[in-house]
Amino acid sequence: MRRMVLFLSLLSVPLAAPAAGSAGADLDPVEVSVRDTVSLQNGAKLFVNYCMSCHSARFMRYNRLARDLDIPEDLVKKHMIFNDGKIGDPMLVTMTPEDGEAWFGVAPPDLSLIGKLRDPAWLYNYLRTFYLDDSTVSGWNNKVFPNVAMPHVLSDLQGIQKAVFETRQDRNGSTHDVLVGFELVREGTMTAHEFDDAMRDLTNFLYYMAEPARMVRITWGIWTLLFLAVFGVLAFLLKKEYWRDVH
């Protein structure tokens, strides 16, 4: 009976992905869930409007996105496909790798699987920690990805911020400048809270896009666990009935 109680307790385990994982303890946590359709819809909107000018998602098709995220195909064609692509096409960009390398120093990577390559907390913090840096080619830098080639394409939403450094001494007596925060230089169209929510949605979409089958797998997993729980109770009652005369 104790085994049955332990088994049933597994049904209460949250389905959201772990927030920090291997990304590091200094990262702000984020909760993602492929069952949050509203969040995924907003994340998809942000992705096509701000990321797909440079980054493709060649393993994701528009019609799959429409079906999974409960978006009518006519709305996808009208508001999310900006070239002559079809609803069944993969999410590609017109920028060539050669152009990307010439403009940014490195070709912008395809983001289909970035949600598997990077922990959700890493992505969430990366999107929120761009700051001005005159020493880089793009004029931007990032807390979790130092010297990144990508400019801050979301600066109109977040605003422009500069890094605040403190000089600290390590155990060997050497001094280092440590990034301890940010100071807003120019406001964006969103408040800090609104931008954090938007980046959570974008992170959630990248997490979903890396494994769209996760949505179906989780649904079937829930039904399977429920079936096994009910079957386990019936099997236990049947066992008691068979062994009643023996005991």
Image (spheres, rainbow, N blue to C red):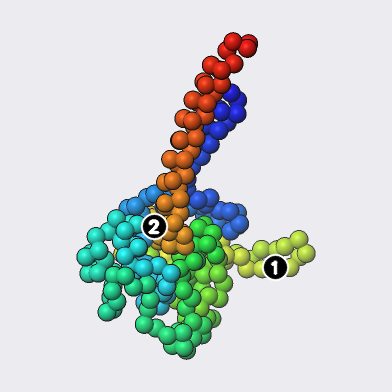
Q: So how many labels did they put on this image?
A: 2
Badge 1 vs badge 2, beta-carbon distance below 8 Å: no
Residue drawn at x 52%, y 21% is 238
Residue drawn at x 46%, y 65% is 127
| Residue 45, image x, y percentages | 32, 64
| On screen, residue 214 above or below 141 | above
Q: Left or right: where does residue 6 sit relative to residue 38?
A: right
| On screen, residue 211 above or below 103 | above
Cα separation between marks 1 and 2: 38 Å
What is the three-letter code of the residue carrying label 2?
Asp
Q: Is residue 198 visible?
A: no
Kindly identify which residue carries mark 1.
Answer: 175
Kindly identify which residue carries mark 2.
Answer: 201
Residue drawn at x 55%, y 76% is 147
| On screen, residue 26 above or below 16 | below
* Mark 2 nearby-residue class (10 Å; few <14, some 14–19, many ≥20): many
Determine which quarter of the picture holds residue 57. bottom left
Foreground mark, 1 or 2, reads 2
Q: Earlier in the sequence, mark 1 or mark 2?
A: 1
**Which secondary structure lies at badge 2?**
helix
**Which secondary structure lies at badge 1?**
strand
Q: Left or right: where does residue 201 sit relative to residue 119?
A: left
What is the three-letter code of the residue carrying label 1?
Thr
Q: Is residue 215 visible?
A: yes
Task: Choose between 227 and 19: the one closer to the eye.
Answer: 227
